[in-house]
Amino acid sequence: MSRYVFKLPDLGEGTVEAEIVNWRVKPGDTVAEDDVLVEVMTEKAAVEVPAPVSGRVLSTTGAPGDMVPVGAELIVLETQPDAAAQAPPAPAVKSAPASTAGNATPAMTSAGGNGAAAVHATQAPAAARSDRVATSPAIRRRAHEAGIDLRQIAGSGPNGRIVPKDLDAYVARRAPQPTPLHAAPKAVPAAARAAEPRVAPSGATQEIKVIGLRRVIAQRMSEAKRNIPHFAYVEELDVTELESLRRHLNSRLAAGAPALTYLPFLALALVRVLRDFPQCNAHYDAERGVIVRHRSVHLGVATQTPDGLKVPVVHDAQALTLWDLAAEMRRVSEAARSNKAKREELSGSTITITSLGKLGGIASTPIINAPEVAIIGVNRALERPVVVDGAIAIRRTMNLSSSFDHRFVDGYDAAAMIQALKECLEHPATIFIAA
C-alpha cells in the first residue's frame, strides 16, 4: 500500500485559500476515484472536490469553518502502489461551459452580488465516472447524513436526475411502519431506553456555526449595509387597471400555460422609465472611483432557493416583450432554484427587483445588490376602500419599496423615478406606447 497526500488544488480565478464547508468522508472510509471528498467555498464559489484516486482515508485536515491555503495538505489516502503512481499531484479545477450541478462534475456556487445572492455554475473534473449519480449538492448532503446510498433511488428528473421528491419518497418508504393498536408491546432493553431521544428542556439552545454560503451571505449583507448609505422610498400604487389587464391576458392563455404575475409588467415599466433615469441603471466601481452607467438593462430577479437568496439575471431586458420577459424571468429563477443556471445567468445585473410574493407585507427596505445603486421591491397587493373623486371605492393597491445608493442617486431623482414607475403601472397602456 502507498500513502497519497492530496493537497487543496487551484480552484481558479486567483483563489489563494478556501473554507471547508462539509466533509463527505472521515478517516477509515473507503473512497473511489471521483467520489466527493469535501465541499469547500472560496470568495468566488462553492466547490465539491473529488477524489483523484481510490483508497482509504487516513486523515483529513481542518474542520468546517476552517480556512485552508491552496497547496496545503487536505487529505491523506492509503492507495494501491500503481494508483498512487498514476494519480496527478494536485489537479487544478477548470471551468466548463453550462453543465448541470450535481452530475458527474463538481458543482460550483458563486457567492457574489446581492445582500444574500448566490450563483450556481459548474466545473469539470479530470475524468468523469459513468456511475456517478446525478443530483444536487444539497440532496447529496441529506443522503450522506441519513446514510442513504443514492444509487438505490430512481430519479424522476431529466436524464434520471434525483430531485428532492425522489429522496423524500425513498425516506418515506424506509420509515418503519407504526405498530398496530392490537399488537402487544415489545419489551425494550434498558440500554435502548437510555439511547432514546428526549424532549429538550425549556430554555435549551442550539448552536449553528456560520460557514459556507451563509457566511458569505452574512458578509455581503454586512458590507452592503456598512458601505452603502441606503435611501429608502415607499410609494403606494393603485393597480386596479393593471390587475384588470393581467386577468384579461391570463384568460386568453392556453390551458396549463403559466399565468402572468405583476413582475413582468413591473420589469417592462422599469425598462421604459430607466431611459429617463440612467443614473439608477448603473454600477459603482469603488476601486476606480467611477460610476458606470449601462445602456442595456440587465435585470436581476432576487429568487429564494433552498440554498439561500440568489439573483439570476435577465440580460438585455430592454429588447424583450412582456411575454418574453415573463418567460425569461421564470426560466432563470427556476434554473437558480434547481442549480442549473449558467455562470453568466447569475452575474452582471445592473438593477434588481425583489418580491416576497404573498409574504410581501405592507413595506420593506430591500438591501442594494452591490455594485448596483438601486433595487425595487414589490409588496403584497390587496383590495381596500379608498377615496376616488370624492367617493369611497374599493381599489386594488400595492406598495413599491425601493432603496437607492444615496451617494450617487439623489433623493429627488429616486422619488421622481418611482413616481414615473407609478404612473406607468397605474395606467398600464402607457407601458406599451413607444416613446
Image (cartoon, rainbow, N blue to C red):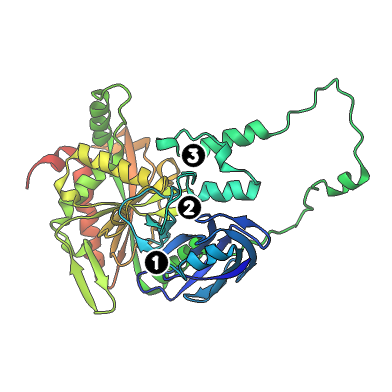
Q: Is residue 147 above or below residue 206?
A: above
> Mark 1 touching mark 2, by CB under 8 A?
no
Q: Can see residue 202?
A: yes
Give the camera-side residue of 205 and 57: 57
Q: Could you tell which of marks 2 and 3 lies nearer the N-terminus?
A: 3
Q: Please state, as top left, top right, bottom left or bottom right, where the N terminus lies in the image.
A: bottom right
* 22 on left or right of 380: right
Q: Secondary structure at mark 1?
A: loop
**Separation of disc 3 and disc 1 at Cα?**
27 Å
Q: Could you tell which of marks 1 and 2 lies nearer the N-terminus?
A: 1
**Separation of disc 2 and disc 3 at Cα?**
17 Å
| Image spot of residue 142 (x, y percent) | 58, 47
Eye-nearest disc, 3 or 1: 3
**Residue 44 has which mark?**
1
Q: Dot 1: few (<14), some (14–19), or many (≥20) neighbours within 10 Å?
A: many
- Looking at the rendered structure, the kind of residue marked 1 is Lys
Give the camera-side residue of 92 and 110: 92
**Residue 162 has which mark?**
3
Q: Which residue is mark 2?
A: 307
